[in-house]
Amino acid sequence: MRFPKTLAYSLILLFSLPAMAGEGLWMIQDPGLERVARQRGLRISVGDVSPAVVSLDFRYSGGVISDRGLVLTSSASIVSYMETLGEEGRKLLRDGFNAAADENEIPLKGERIYSLIKVFDVSGEVRSMERELKDLAVIAARLEAAYARSTGLYCKMSSVWEGESAYISAYKVYDDIRLVCVPPQSLARPGGEWSWPAHGCDFALLRIYENGVPALTGHTLGVSLEGYYKGDLTMTAGFPAHTERYLSSAAVKMKEYVEVPVYNTLAAGRLELLNRCIESDPAVRMKYYTRVSFLEKELGFGRGLEASCGRRGLVSSKEAYERWMPDWFLKDLRETFQGIAPVEGDKIWRRETLVNGSYAFGYLREASTAGSLERMKEILLSGVRDTDPKVEKELITFALREFFTNLDSYYYGPFQRWIQDRFGYDYVAAAEFLWGGSYLSSEKKIREMASADDIKEDTLLRFLSDCPLEVFDSRGNHRETLDKAGHLSREYVRYIHMGETGSGVPSYPDADSTMRVSFGTVDGYSPRDGEYLGWYTVPEGLLREYEIPQRYRSLLSKGFWGRWGFRIGGKRHGMVVDFLIDNDFSDGSQGSPVLSSEGHLLGLVSGGNEESLACGVVYQKDYSRCVATDIRFILWYLERASGLKRIVKEIHFS
């Protein structure tokens, strides 16, 4: 580790280091986790409940709530899968689904659930292997294979604190997953994501099968009916995706002023174009609905981050934290990032026009690397089936306009220069020409391909390939400066790790799809306009604000909650739909169980408020909130709205 060793610097670390803002995404194997849990007020061991927490393909989280493999998760976890089923899947999402018996549960082919069995500290082994092998990916592959052989489990290595520690997580993998219940999307996620107040009955029930029968996983979460109130402790456990919590202020500034605005501009343009095409043609809606949903989600994150950077002063908050670091180091860091910013911005223009500008582009790139002519044809034919020529040509037109308008001609290849010279500003004609010379324009052309080399003549692929990434890295001394920025960023993280370890400040590394635990409380908040927003919503808001099927409207309006009701808002038998907690979280935490201080299940993480969209970079305790769906509202839905009393009977209650 390359750190200053002076006594003065050590004293700064030990006595002047400020704590990072945030409650923490604590790794399940962190030796300090139980101490933090007790300090926060958890009355049980984290290890008592974590075995019942599972990951859904490391995209969403969930919890096992019965001894027959029943998993509670977010409804968002099945949306993409159902969209692949075409009209049948979209109908299911629209109307909802309830399996009357085990045999009616729908198999989700290709979906997997991962149950964490054990975590191994392999830091010493990694350091030993580094003497011979310099590539961390090679080291990870060897260790994962070795531990998989010895355990018989799926093993995945995570390197944290820039190589200071490394862990192998060993998982049992279940690949027979079936859908038990999901509400209609108009009820599960009314009004979309990332807003508050929210009124979504957001959940899905899946079942794990093993050898053709419901799995006996051995661990379940107990459902609580006791309730919770403002200020009560909450714990979440799940598998958040990668975060960038330890970006420097220089890196955040580049993200705020260079990367995010470019991405948002281009993504918004594509989204507007796609929505216009979808509205005019039902067939187009079928092919692009999932793609639009994904783009909306990504753009939502981008806009949330851009807004949070400006309103919340993320750069200044990072700079305030960094004041304990040496001036020479921070100056070098800032100047280096300023040096790479222009070309890194150009790379994003390239990526969002030539790489992500059209869905046809993806099929052509994949086909060009296929190992055989047969496989190449298969990929191209799927591209023809899964895209619409009119939509793709409009996307290509948009991409051409943005590419030629915003990128310096220094980056253009000879074929791109030829296209510009021939068509000038007539991007519609240029797109028509490129599409007409592409194999994706005709199934007949694809079937007549005689050799895998034929694809090299595809005009669209030629245009895409004419501006390789190497051209950007070779401009001036960009490659060297970029390498220096990476080196300084790694040193920055190591500074933090050593500083927090030396000062006794609790610390946790970036999240990277490993199991994480966070602690918080039930709490409302005041957004930027200063108006206090309460910590829960009730069914009346769902009835008042959203269009939902009449059957559910009638049930909700009666307000008969039976055994699931509880005292809230002055009502003896009230009901909460969603509630707020200030736990730390990130994308991938959706579906995470929300637990009480006794480890009882209170609900599940549905999403967050608008201010939480910056959580990938920084958690802000005053503003970042998780939106959670109340377990009692889910139970009411299962018993009263869906008629799944058989499911309620098998759920484990505390």
Image (cartoon, helix red, strand yellow):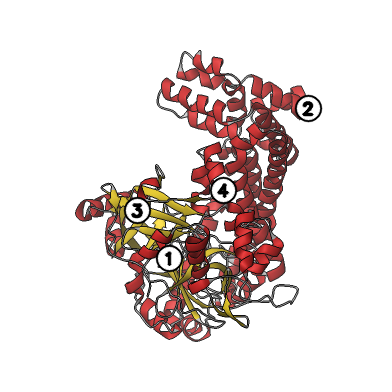
Q: Which amino acid lies under the numbered mark 3 shown in the image of this protein? A: Ile
Q: CA distance from mark 1 to mark 4?
A: 46 Å
Instruction: Return the disc, 2 or 4, that comes first in the chain's sequence.
Output: 4
Helix, strand or loop at label 3? It is strand
Q: Which amino acid lies under the numbered mark 1 shown in the image of this protein? A: Trp
- In the picture of the structure, the residue carrying the numbered disc 2 is 424
- In the picture of the structure, the residue carrying the numbered disc 1 is 161
Image side of residue 549 versus residue 65, left or right: right
Q: Nearer the viewer, residue 545 or 109?
A: 545
Image side of residue 501 versus residue 115, left or right: right
Which label is found at residue 208?
Answer: 3
Question: Which quadrant of the rendered structure holds the N terminus?
Answer: bottom left
Is the residue marked by circle 2 packed among few (<14), some (14-19), or many (20+) residues within 10 Å? few
Instruction: Return the disc, 1 or 4, that comes first in the chain's sequence.
Output: 4
Q: CA distance from mark 3 to mark 1?
A: 35 Å
- In the picture of the structure, the residue carrying the numbered disc 4 is 95
**Mark 3 near mark 2, Cβ–Cβ under 8 Å?**
no
